[in-house]
Image (cartoon, rainbow, N blue to C red):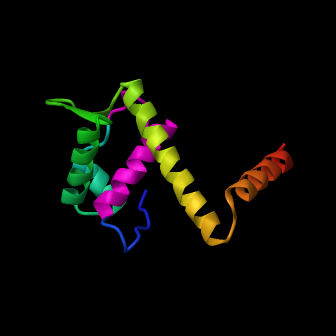
């Protein structure tokens, strides 16, 4: 699971984003027990403190929780997962719209292009 990390963002931020995506997409299902901080750090090739910081952020977001003697788990709160998914989707849409605007597209042209792509896909 050793990932390539970008140099323009802190690694813990990138880990938070990846975990959010994995939780929102179901790759990390509700109730799943997470590996220990040490195991995750070794698997990802990063410092354990970096993993700990990312997991603390996910706990603040309500996407993971800690059971004192059992470890960390993905939340079973489907509303929290749905909020995360919506937030990530909105972020992707804003990034897409900004990139298309930089290319010179107007909103109507973007919608038409999306419709064409959808029709070609079908």
Between 57 and 90, the residue placed more toward the observer is 90
Quadrant where the N terminus is found in the figure: bottom left
Give whichever of 106, 33 is nearer the camera.
106
Question: Left of 62 or right of it: where is 32?
Answer: right
By secondary structure, the bulk of the magenta-drawn segment is best described as helix
Residue in view at x 48 percent, y 39 percent = 86
Q: Residue at x 35, y 55 (%)?
A: 15
Q: Is residue 111 left or right of residue 56?
A: right
* Residue 72 visible in the displayed image: no
Give the image location of residue 85, x and y in percent. Answer: 47, 39
At 85% from the left edge and 50% from the top edge, which residue is drawn?
Answer: 120
The extreme bottom residue here reads 7
Q: Is residue 22 above or below residue 74?
A: below
In the displayed structure, 66 sits above or below 37; it is above
Looking at the image, residue 95 sits to the left or right of residue 42; the answer is: right
Relative height, residue 36 to residue 11 (above, below): above
Instruction: State whether residue 106 appears in this view.
Output: yes
Q: Position of residue 31 (x, y in %)?
A: 36, 27
Residue 88: x and y in percent read 47, 46
What segment is highlighted magenta in the picture?
11-33
Total marks shown come to 0
Residue 40 falls within the magenta-colored stretch? no
Residue at image location 28% in from the left, 50% down from the top: 39
């Amino acid at each position: 699971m050793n990932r390539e990390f970008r140099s323009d963002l802190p690694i813990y931020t990138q880990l938070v984003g990846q975990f959010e995506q994995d939780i929102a997409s179901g790759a990390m299902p509700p109730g799943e027990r997470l590996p220990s901080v040490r195991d995750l750090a070794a698997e990802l090739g990063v410092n354990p403190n970096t993993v700990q910081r990312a997991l603390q952020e996910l706990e603040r977001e309500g996407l993971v929780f800690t059971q004192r003697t059992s470890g960390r788990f993905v939340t079973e709160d489907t509303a929290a997962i749905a909020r995360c998914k919506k937030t990530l989707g909105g972020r992707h849409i804003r990034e897409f719209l900004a990139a298309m605007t930089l290319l010179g597209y107007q909103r109507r042209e973007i919608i038409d292009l999306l419709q064409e792509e959808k029709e070609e896909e079908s």
